[in-house]
Image: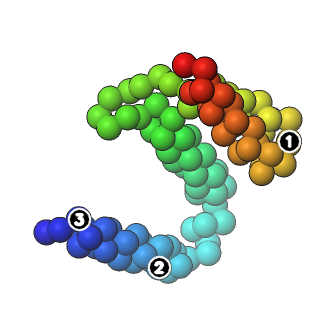
Amino acid sequence: MTLWQIVLLASIACLALKLLGYLVPASVLAKPATARTAELLTVALLAALIAVQTLGSGQAIEADARIPALGVAAILFALRVPFVLVVLAAAAVAALIRLLT
């Protein structure tokens, strides 16, 4: 099986899972526990994605310029700075650190 076949199968599986989500009755989704779980699960998945992309380097954990850039982005995000500026500032911090090291 080639990499593209795996990607296509994974894409089809994700689409099928999304379509199955539309079949869930509204009464199930209206329960407070379900709504709270869905909200927390989204945040947890995004946090995991950020951690993997920031710290991961192949199979190893690597500390480099991405960590301070993420910190700057988190601070600016907490200050409710527009998202474009947050991305630009984080990229500038990472670039500056990589330039200096």
**Residue 27 percent location from the top left of the image:** 61, 72
Image quadrant in which you'd find residue 91? top right
Examine the image and state in which quarter residue 30 appears. Answer: bottom right
In depth, the one of 79 and 36 nearer the eye is 79
Depicted 73 relative to depicted 2: above or below: above
The quadrant the N terminus occupies is bottom left
Nearer the observer: mark 1 or 2; the answer is 1
Q: Which mark is residue 32?
A: none
* Element under disc 1: loop
The mark nearer the N terminus, 1 or 3, is 3
Indicate the position of residue 36 as horizontal and vertical percent values. 64, 51
Viewer-side label of 1, 3: 3
Residue drawn 60% across and 20% down? Answer: 100
**Coordinates of residue 35 in the picture (x, y in percent):** 64, 57
Circle 3 SS class: helix
Q: What amino acid does circle 1 point to?
A: Arg
Determine which residue is flagged by label 3.
3
Give the position of the C terminus as an image quadrant. top right
Under circle 2, the secondary element is: helix
Q: Which residue is mark 1?
A: 80
**Residue drawn where x is 37% and y is 34% of the image:** 57
> Is residue 88 left or right of 101 when viewed as pictured?
right
Q: Which comes sooner in the sequence, label 3 or label 2?
A: 3
Q: Which residue is mark 2?
A: 19
Q: Amino acid at mark 2?
A: Leu
Of labels 3 and 2, the one closer to you = 3
Q: Where does the image place residue 41, in percent across and percent down from the top left? A: 55, 49
Q: Relative to 37, is 4 above or below?
A: below
Nearest to the observer: residue 90 or residue 20: 90
Q: CA distance from mark 1 to mark 3?
A: 40 Å
Residue furthest to the top: 101
